[in-house]
Image: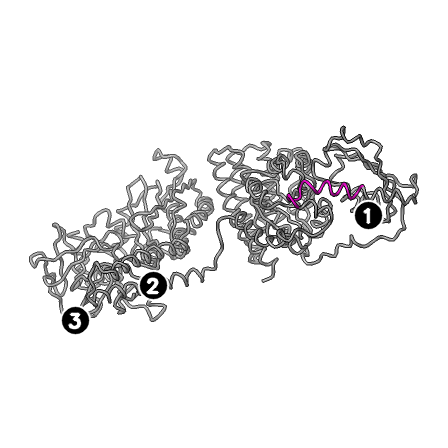
């Protein structure tokens, strides 16, 4: 059974690119547009891995991660944060908020899949 | 189109949206909005553009967006104050960014000098820039931006990552000690996976230290009790090893040392133990996240239960239904086909009704009731379909702030644009064709309407001129107004200019309103010199014509020293029309209802001849020119008897009233517009055609054209109306 990845990003372009890279690699993908939406679909999506952007309207990545980690049923889901390399402080903040790891934008599909494999079997 | 090309298209669409957000946000900040989310939204827009551009190797875009983003980051962090000057630079940068996006999309080029100058201005906004030695030179350096952001060439099809290749058991021997902290597990990292990743680097032997493992009753399920010693032989360096632990380095104790303290052990029993530990740790960690009931199969490594497997695709669909926004993108052709079909349905329904009447079926009969319901439903379907094509005027309004800035800069005037009713919806076609006239009118408002700052100051007005753009729905039409608080129309100049160009008689006694409307006449231009901005050979007559082509009307109100207001009223759709069906010389015509003010049966005493065939009619003490539609359209040569006819009092653009003479009124109905030009050719006085309930084709009258044609004919007539007007 293929693994499910929940992608949370307000950018349609980024969602599409993740969808392409992940479905090519054999993952099932569920998309959400921001943190609020991500938490809404969490239960039905039952992701094996979550990939989230940080800067989003309504609820940003930090709030979203805190929400997932505070949810008894889903708190053990690995969360990868999409970040630009310059965001060292953001990386740190995401890590503190409970992110499992990160993916640097613009991402290389190979690295993306590697990062997912590193956090999910 | 391959997948990446499609995403690229999405990217550019998204860019347009983000550029819109960017501009709106910056304007809000300029207006004093200090909500951090506004600044954040602005930052996010540029950040997203940069992110997407990086993926497509649009280097120019990446670099400019990066410089812009950095400046916005200062603003966001409060290191930079959102002063008027700062926002001016940012607004110009937003315009530049739009240019760079479009150049990237259309393959054009941008003004490099301007771009670099702006980039330098943006860099200078850095509060630390003053102390830097960096001189913003011409050379757009990526040196200082590349601190962090390097585009990566992406190939989405190549997944041969090489990590599966087992390294030969050669190279250095590394000794790794790895003790996870509870936080590592709390963040959903897994030791087993890390060890697996590590095993890709070379040949390794793993020892698990279980000495700290407490008895079961003391065991904290969220604690961390195991640590590992790994002997790894690899030809990769230490950095490669540390990279495996990149995500967890804060949440574990990690020690990587070159050289072999822990030599390879060949204790088969221990290996077995490690394997078992790994398996159990993996199973334990997998359990809480696996769906209930699947624990067993997940731990056993078996495929998911059949129920889950079969419901998988359905789940994807359900999820996507929930997760995607409540909108879909549909090819416009499909919508148009639907609209056409609904149009046919409307005609068909009308035919059925007609046939029912002809068959003499009683009003209350079952068939008649059914048909009534069908008519209701058809109307509703039609409205719903039309609503699909409706879009908020926002898309056009959004382009105006930039235009205003540019024209303001060119004319040296200070202008503030306010907008209202951006969410008012109108048919997509109308929106598309609205951009040009609107652009021209806003240019005019700034160039001709607003005074120079000095003159405004002298008049006691604020130096900043106001242009207000608004849209609203009124009686089934969209009304768009462009108001300025400038000097208003210089009536004496307009009148003398019109007279000097032979457009009116020099002594024609015109009302203020009529003088104002002279500017819509072909060949009229008020600017004494053809300026760079407004006078590109396009006058208000062209604006009026393009509005008329949309079935709209335009008029002006002006007050000296207080400003002018242009009002356009347009139909909400170009697909259907409410009309009055009339007969003229045996032909059936449809007159748009929006043009008709009232209908009346003239008395012979009210009609006065005025030389030749020209006649006027007195309606409530007003002289109104009487136009015989049959004659005007060459349906007949003789003159119709007004007393045996019906008069339609119509209003054409510029609030001009005329009386149209027709033979009889058959009724009112909604008709589906069929273009004559597309199917035949343009015919004077006819706007389009339609098919009536009985299947006959009827022509839709172009009221403005008929009125203009009739009034243009005898010059004396014009003067008469002016005199009596």
Of the numbered discs in the image, which one, if any, rests on residue B199? 1
The Cα atoms of the two marked residues, 3 and 2, are separated by 38 Å
Residue B437 in the image: state x and y as whole percent: 38, 53
Q: Are marks 3 and 2 in contact (CB under 8 Å)?
A: no
**Which quadrant would the N terminus of chain B be assigned to in this image?**
bottom right
Query: Looking at the image, which residue sits at the far left?
Result: B605
Which residue occupies 61% across, 36% down? Answer: A71
Which residue occupies 48% across, 57% down? Answer: B330
Task: Pick the residue in front: B178 or B215.
Answer: B215
The Cα atoms of the two marked residues, 1 and 3, are separated by 99 Å
Sooner in the amino-acid sequence: mark 1 or mark 3: 1
Question: Mark 3 highlights which residue?
Answer: B637
Kind of element beneath mark 2: helix
- From the viewer's perspective, is the residue at label 3 or at label 2 nearer? 2
**Neighbour class for label 3 at 10 Å: few (<14), some, many (≥20)?**
few
Which residue occupies 40% across, 53% down? Answer: B390
Question: Mark 2 highlights which residue?
Answer: B345
Q: Is residue B9 left or right of residue B453?
A: right
Magenta residues, start to end: B277-293
Task: Pick the residue in front: B238 or A22.
Answer: A22
In the image, is residue B47 above or below residue B430?
above
Residue B504 in the image: state x and y as whole percent: 23, 56
**Neighbour class for label 1 at 10 Å: few (<14), some, many (≥20)?**
many
Kind of element beneath mark 3: loop
């Amino acid at each position: 059974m293929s693994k499910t990845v929940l992608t949370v990003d307000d950018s349609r372009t980024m969602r599409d690119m993740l969808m392409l890279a992940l479905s090519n690699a054999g993952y099932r993908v569920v998309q959400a547009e921001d943190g609020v939406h991500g938490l809404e679909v969490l239960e039905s999506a039952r992701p094996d891995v979550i990939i989230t952007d940080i800067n989003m309207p309504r609820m940003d990545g930090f709030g979203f991660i805190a929400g997932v980690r505070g949810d008894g049923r889903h708190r053990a889901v690995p969360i990868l944060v999409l970040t630009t390399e310059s965001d060292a402080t953001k990386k740190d903040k995401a890590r503190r908020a409970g992110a499992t790891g990160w993916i640097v934008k613009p991402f290389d599909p190979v690295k993306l899949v590697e990062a997912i494999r590193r956090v999910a079997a | 189109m391959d997948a990446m090309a499609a995403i690229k298209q999405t990217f550019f669409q998204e860019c347009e949206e983000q550029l819109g957000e960017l501009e709106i946000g910056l304007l809000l900040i300029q207006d004093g909005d200090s909500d951090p989310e506004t600044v954040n939204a602005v930052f996010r827009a540029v950040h997203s553009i940069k992110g997407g551009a990086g993926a497509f190797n649009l280097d120019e875009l990446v670099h400019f967006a990066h410089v812009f983003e950095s400046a916005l980051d200062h603003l966001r962090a409060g290191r930079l104050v959102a002063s008027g000057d700062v926002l001016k630079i940012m607004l110009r940068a937003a315009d530049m960014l739009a240019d760079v996006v479009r150049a990237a999309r259309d393959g054009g080029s941008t003004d490099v000098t301007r771009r670099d100058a702006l980039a330098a201005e943006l860099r200078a906004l850095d509060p630390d820039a003053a102390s830097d030695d960096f001189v913003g030179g011409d050379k757009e350096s990526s040196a200082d931006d590349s601190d962090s952001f390097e585009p990566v060439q992406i190939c989405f099809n190549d997944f041969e990552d090489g990590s599966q290749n087992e390294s030969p058991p050669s190279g250095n021997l590394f000794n790794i000690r790895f003790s996870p902290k509870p936080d590592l597990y709390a963040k959903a990292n897994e030791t087993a996976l890390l060890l697996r990743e590590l095993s890709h680097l070379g040949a390794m032997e793993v020892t698990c230290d279980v000495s700290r493992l407490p008895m079961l009753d003391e065991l904290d399920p969220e604690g961390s009790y195991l640590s590992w010693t790994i002997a790894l032989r690899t030809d990769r360096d230490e950095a490669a090893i540390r990279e495996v632990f990149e995500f967890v380095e804060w949440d574990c104790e990690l020690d990587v040392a070159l050289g072999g303290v822990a030599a390879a052990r060949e204790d088969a029993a221990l290996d077995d133990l490690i394997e078992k530990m790994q398996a159990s740790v993996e199973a334990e960690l997998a359990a809480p996240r696996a769906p209930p009931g699947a624990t067993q199969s997940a731990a056993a490594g078996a495929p998911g239960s059949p129920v889950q497997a079969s419901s998988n695709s359905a789940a994807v669909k359900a999820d996507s239904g929930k997760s995607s926004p409540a909108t879909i993108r549909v090819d416009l052709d499909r919508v148009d086909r639907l609209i056409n079909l609904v149009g046919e349905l409307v005609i068909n329904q009308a035919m059925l009704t007609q046939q029912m009447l002809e068959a003499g079926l009683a009003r209350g009969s079952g068939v008649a009731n059914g048909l009534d319901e069908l008519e209701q439903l058809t109307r509703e379907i039609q409205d719903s379909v039309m609503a699909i094509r409706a879009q908020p005027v926002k898309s056009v309004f959004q382009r105006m702030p930039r235009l205003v800035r540019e024209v303001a800069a060119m004319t040296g005037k200070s202008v503030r644009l306010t907008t209202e009713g951006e969410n008012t919806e109108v048919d997509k076609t109308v929106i598309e064709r609205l951009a040009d006239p609107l652009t021209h009118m806003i240019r005019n408002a700034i160039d001709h309407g607003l005074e120079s700052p000095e003159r405004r100051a002298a008049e006691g007005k604020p130096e900043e001129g106001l242009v207000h753009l608004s849209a609203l729905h009124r009686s089934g039409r969209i009304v768009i107004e462009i108001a300025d608080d400038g000097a208003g129309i210089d009536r004496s100049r307009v009148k003398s200019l019109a007279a000097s160009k032979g457009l009116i008689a020099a002594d024609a006694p015109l009302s203020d309103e009529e003088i104002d409307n002279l500017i819509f006449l072909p060949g009229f231009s008020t600017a004494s010199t053809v300026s760079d901005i407004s006078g590109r050979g396009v006058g208000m007559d062209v604006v009026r014509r393009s509005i008329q082509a949309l079935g709209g009307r335009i008029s002006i109100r002006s007050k000296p020293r207080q400003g002018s207001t242009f009002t356009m009223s347009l139909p909400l759709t170009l697909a259907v029309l409410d009309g009055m069906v009339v007969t003229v010389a045996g032909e059936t015509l449809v007159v748009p209802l929006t043009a008709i003010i009232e209908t009346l049966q003239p008395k012979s005493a009210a009609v006065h001849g005025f030389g030749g065939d020209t006649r006027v009619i007195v309606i409530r003490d007003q002289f109104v020119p009487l136009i015989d539609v049959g004659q005007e359209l060459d349906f007949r040569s003789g003159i119709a008897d007004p007393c045996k006819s019906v008069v339609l009092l119509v209003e054409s653009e510029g609030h001009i009233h005329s009386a149209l003479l027709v033979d009889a009124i058959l009724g009112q109905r909604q008709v589906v517009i069929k273009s004559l030009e597309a199917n035949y050719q343009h015919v004077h006085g006819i706007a389009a055609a339609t098919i009536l309930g009985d299947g006959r084709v009827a022509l839709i009258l172009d009221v403005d054209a008929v009125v203009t044609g009739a009034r243009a004919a005898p010059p004396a007539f014009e003067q008469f109306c002016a005199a009596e007007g």
